Amino acid sequence: MPKTTNKYATDSDFVRNLEQDITAFIKAGTEQTDTEDKFNELALRLFEYQYNANAPYQKYCAKRGIKPGDIESWEEIPAVPMSAFKEIPLCTFPPEEATGIFRSSGTTNPEKRSKIYLNDTGLKLLDTSYMYSVVNYLYPSGENLHTLFMSPPPHLVPPDSVLMYGYSKILANHTIGDIEYFMDEKGFNLEALVARLRKAEETGESVFVISVTTGYLHFFNYCLSKGISFNLPEGSRLGDGGGYKGRSREISKKEFFELAQKMTGVPPHCLINGYSMTELQTAFCDNVLYNYVKGIKEPRYKLGPPWTRSVVVDPETLQPLTKGETGLLRHYCLANINTVLAVQTDDLGYQIGDGFEVVGRAKGAEARGCSIAMDELISAQGM
Amino acid sequence: MLGTKTSIPAFFLPGLDEADFADFTTIEFGQGQNRVRMHSPVLTPALLSKVIAQLKEAREEYLAKLPVYEIIRTIDKAVALWRDSAYPPRRKAEALLPLITGYSSQMITQTLDEMVLMLRGEDLKLLLEEELGDPLFLDQFRPRRKSTGMCKAYGPKLTTAVFAGNVPGLPVANIIYALLMKSAILGKSASEEPLFAVLFAQSLAEVDPELARSVAMVCWKGGDEEIEDVVFSSSDAVIVYGGERSVNEVRKRVPSGTRFIAYGHKLSFGVIGREYLAADRVRQTAAQAAIDASVFDQQGCLSPHVFYVEEGAEITPKEFAKLLAHQMDAFNQKIPRGRISPDESAAINQLRGSYEFRELEKDDIAILHSSQGTDWTVIYENDPVFVPSCLNRTIRVKPVKDVKDVVDLIKPVKGYLQTVGAALLEKRFVSLADKMGQLGADRICPLGKMTAPSLTWHHDGRFNLLDLLRWTDIEEVLDKG
């Protein structure tokens, strides 16, 4: 009998087969149906692997009295809070063997950023998963567009953002010519973007503008101050992600879409909000463009691909809520082969249709009383 | 269900009637079946001018002429009404404050019980004696205590207080302070809890309607310049509670000659010495620490963020953390943690998650928490650096070799120090008190009493009344003729 340590080695049959089966599942695409049994079977196998190959996770599960073989449903797999990724390497192999290390942007505290360690298998699955999860929602007709990216070009970006890694390949595959970047060491190059959008208006060639949401807010403020607006050619689309909290004020998703349409002339079904995080090797996108093209009448929300499940839990008890209730999003993702497949986020959201919608990130403890809250102290002291 | 059909006034404007109000805004608290609706008139500069004129007139004609002991008696009577658990406003407060503030009913009941014990006539007299020496300085020229001549104290004609947060009862103290100084008071309720001060003002009106005409409680949106210009320019004193940003906003709008007092956000912590960690008394020590970390769900500026526990005793700091966890649980059985926002719950769960994984790696970290929900969390960690808590009964225990090491650890937050709860024998207690005093702490108290300051406490290191009074002296010994 082989030792258990061998059974779950990264080059073991168990892991190779698991990887192949997950890859095949992902490659079957977003349109496959009746995937519950398949998902469950793979999730339980992946859990078995991660339980046995990821020592801290095993201890975490043991503390909850859960181990592979005892559970029958993916819903029982213990979810790891996002904050855990800031503390220790959570991976199924020694972290020094990682061939790709990704970090979260760590906006609140740069010292405390999530770190994800992937090996070649993990990187391959990340590629495949990103590729298959979002393409349908960004390019439902398989079309190519001019890509205008409000991000620094790759040689200026720290090579550790999972988003950049995941998205840049997809964008490259669907870009006419080269991706055009509108940010450098000095920040956004807004004048160049204005000129480029004017050119699109003249040539009638549709563009796909991609930016973090706050980048758009910055750009729109700039345009408003100059009295500029656009009427971009049909087929143009805007992709945003990352939250609606601007430097001066937070605007609602609805306000953002209204503003975006007013400033660019791009209709709502071409305004696509993306949702992704370092801890998850899959990205989610709004269904609006896909539904428009397919003639499906449904409200805007995010539809997870078949190799993911997203549930909403009570922020207080972490128990699942019923559909429609707002709570914390918890994601299960089979592409997370190297880390932990179940991730408890602190994003607030609710289940809708066959997917979910994000309301925003939990703001943390704002003191209701007169005690100083952590954030306030940090900002007051410039800590 | 109480409060779902009827709306409750979130204002106290005794001089006005329905006809004066053009429009109302409503606020709803609670969720599902347990909801309460409150309403408040939409204020205009004109309406506020009228309110202010009436307050000043009521003060001039009545309050200013009342002897101070008469005022004390009136307040004492109003407070005494609240001692009766069947008193309808008290029952209303006990039913509605949990919905409004999220605090558990047990927490609210205990708060009310403590408050009526703290605001008795004799306590108010003690406060006046403590700060003024002789309360009668407020009534007449009285001989000065040491120098020759006489003097008399005058309070503001109108005190405006901008309240914040939802530690219940705070506004009541300020209403009482103002009345003791024969000042009319215009209170701006915190939107988080606009009820209790209104109910208390109504009790004052029950006892002495004329006196209550010097009190008004209203709501307006903070930062409304038109309104605040009217209010601040008519006030002799402005008191503001709030975070740094909101305090600074108000400060900018208060005329330079007006007395301005700000109570900013503060933080507190506890220190536990070896002598209180002996096997025969450590359980009591832990119980007292649990009270401090649990009352008001840790929302008060008096609530501890961290307990520094001395090494070298019979019980180690890590063992103490376990005992504290027991006591946090016991306290929670008795007085449950209140309802908190999803954001707050999420913050606690993520914090627990990160410490749980740290604990797996290091044995100098331990995390203990309520078996369900986020009711309470005790984190033991070796790293002594002071870290503010995410509150709602989340407390860190950190070891120190010696109590005096705390001084350096606290220095980074010295501008925000409020209360230090200490379990130390007298000599070390006083020595620590001096060091903490130098760092800006304004109160060193025994463990278990952190959230229950006396009425004579120097809040934020200042006098409660004296800072607002103005004095007139008669220097000559007068010829009686």
Image (cartoon, coloured by chain):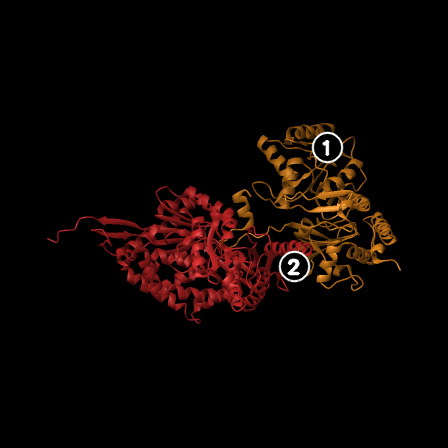
Chain colours: A orange, B red
Horizontal side of B294 relative to B85 (left or right) equals right
* Residue A358 in view here: yes
Q: Position of residue B436 (x, y in %)?
A: 45, 52
Can you tell which mark lies on residue A314?
A: 2
Side (left or right) of B126 relative to A206: left
Q: Which mark is residue A37?
A: none
Chain letter of disc 1? Answer: A
Between B87 and A81, the one nearer to me in the picture: A81
Tag 2 secondary structure: loop
Q: Which residue is mark 1?
A: A155
The C terminus of chain A sits in image quarter: top right
**Badge 2 local density, few (<14 within 10 Å), some, or many (20+)?**
many
Q: Quadrant of residue B205?
A: bottom left
- Residue B54 percent location from the top left of the image: 33, 53
| Residue A53 % position (x, y) | 79, 54
Give amino acid for label 1.
His
Foreground of the two, A322 or A168: A168
- Compare residues A269 and A178 and report the one nearer the observer: A178
> Which residue of the protein is positioned furthest toward the left in this rendering?
B481
How many marks the image carries: the answer is 2
Q: How far apart in space, not on screen, are marks 2 and 1 (Cα)?
A: 42 Å
Earlier along the polypeptide chain: callout 2 or callout 1?
Answer: 1
Residue A58, horizontal then vertical, whole percent: 75, 58
Q: Is residue A371 above or below residue A102?
A: below
Residue drawn at point x = 68 percent, y = 44 percent:
A104
> In this view of the protein, which residue sits in the foreground, A343 or A262?
A343
Q: Amino acid at mark 2?
A: Asp
| Residue at mark 2: chain | A
- Say what secondary structure mark 1 lies in: helix
Q: Residue at the spot x=61%, y=63% of the render?
A: B370
